[in-house]
């Protein structure tokens, strides 16, 4: 009979005496703690290894197999035959055995792509991994992107559109949902797709999946653009202040957020007498220099931009550091 420490009490009762059943993982038996009847003698231990000192080690040592994931064909629940023609001891196998293993691998590949949907999913998953890696996006987005792509396939929305355009649209949707500053132009460059096609596909996918994608604001792009041109945090704070004032005046509506952010960042840098050209900031924002110039002109015509420089000068004078202005 198993000890209390070796087994775990189950909810079922013994069919003979009604006693409590105990799982004896050491002998792989399910036995009655009262009469000793062996109810089952082939139970599997689905728990983790005993020598686990933290939650991470416990998860790594579980013996239930890899978790289901949407980033693999068949959600990872399939058999894989490796490419090495070796036996269990690592030794070479006979010529006949190598032929059998070759045929097994060939049929395994054919089974994995038995349907048209699965044929589309395999290159799509590779494209998702490549695109997220080049954009420097978190790996947790890969699972969300794979789930969304499967939904699009099930609804038949891929038909007539390239996989690259669909993946670019998914990436843009997820970035906006997570408030990650990635412009449509950046994603289009990585995908090799025209930005207009990415935008058109994004609207098509969002409409058919009934997704409510939160709008991006110029403030979302400021830290990224400022980091690229080497501007400090206090310049970002001043740029946020200018954007909020412009928003209250209705000057940001109907304008591309990246263009407004670039123009305001140029204004904030000028407030602190930091020599940054419009071209530098335009290149960092992924917009044209003309866009920065036009947004800057609009803000300059309808706002008193000198007041921000005046405020900075007064603050510096109060701190005794006004010589630089």
Image: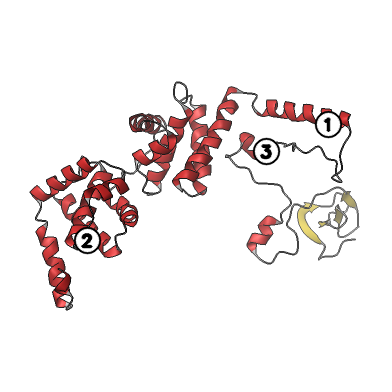
294 above or below 120?
A: below
Q: CA distance from mark 3 to mark 2?
A: 57 Å
Of the image marks 1 and 3, the number of the one nearer the N terminus: 3
Marks 3 and 2: which is nearer the front?
Answer: 2
Seen at 77% across and 39% down, the residue is 84
x, y percentage for residue 204?
37, 29
Of helix, strand and loop, which one carries label 2?
loop
Residue 112 located left or right of residue 281: right
> Is residue 241 something one can see in this rendering?
no
x, y percentage for residue 109?
69, 29
Seen at 44% across and 21% down, the residue is 160
Of helix, strand and loop, which one carries label 3?
loop
Q: Nearer the viewer, residue 30 or 207?
A: 207
Q: How many marks?
A: 3
Of the image marks 2 and 1, the number of the one nearer the N terminus: 1
Is the residue under label 2 in contact with that under label 3 (CB below 8 Å)?
Answer: no
User: Residue under circle 2?
Assistant: 274
x, y percentage for residue 19?
84, 57
Marks 2 and 1: which is nearer the front?
Answer: 2
Q: Which residue reaches farthest top? A: 160
Residue 277 located left or right of residue 118: left
Q: CA distance from mark 1 to mark 3?
A: 25 Å
User: Residue under circle 3?
Assistant: 77
């Amino acid at each position: 009979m198993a000890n209390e420490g070796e087994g775990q009490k189950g909810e079922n009762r013994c069919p003979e005496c009604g006693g409590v059943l105990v799982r004896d993982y050491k002998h792989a038996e399910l036995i009655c703690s009262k009469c000793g009847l062996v109810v089952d003698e082939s139970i599997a231990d689905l728990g983790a290894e005993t020598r686990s000192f933290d939650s991470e080690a416990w998860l790594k040592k579980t013996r239930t197999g890899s978790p289901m994931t949407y980033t693999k064909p068949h959600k990872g629940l399939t058999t894989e035959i490796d490419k090495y023609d070796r036996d269990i001891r690592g030794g070479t196998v006979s010529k006949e055995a190598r032929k059998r293993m070759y045929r097994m691998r060939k049929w395994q590949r054919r089974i994995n792509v038995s349907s048209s949907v699965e044929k589309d999913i395999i290159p799509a998953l590779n494209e998702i991994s490549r695109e997220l890696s080049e954009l420097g996006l978190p790996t947790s987005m890969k699972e969300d992107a794979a789930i969304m792509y499967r939904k699009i396939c099930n609804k038949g929305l891929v038909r007539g559109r390239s996989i690259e355009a669909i993946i670019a649209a998914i990436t843009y949707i997820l970035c906006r949902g997570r408030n990650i500053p990635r412009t449509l132009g950046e994603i289009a460059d990585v995908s090799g797709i025209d930005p207009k096609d990415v935008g058109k596909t994004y609207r098509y996918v969002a409409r058919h999946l009934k997704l409510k994608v939160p709008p991006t604001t110029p403030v979302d792009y400021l830290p990224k653009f400022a980091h690229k041109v080497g501007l400090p945090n206090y310049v970002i704070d001043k740029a946020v202040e200018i954007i909020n004032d412009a928003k209250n005046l209705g000057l940001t509506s109907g304008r591309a957020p990246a263009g407004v952010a670039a123009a305001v960042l140029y204004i904030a840098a000028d407030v602190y007498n930091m020599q940054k050209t419009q071209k530098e900031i335009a290149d960092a924002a992924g917009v044209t220099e003309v866009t920065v110039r036009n947004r800057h002109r609009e803000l300059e015509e309808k706002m008193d931009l000198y007041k921000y420089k005046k405020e900075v000068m007064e603050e510096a004078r109060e701190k005794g550091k006004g010589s630089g202005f």
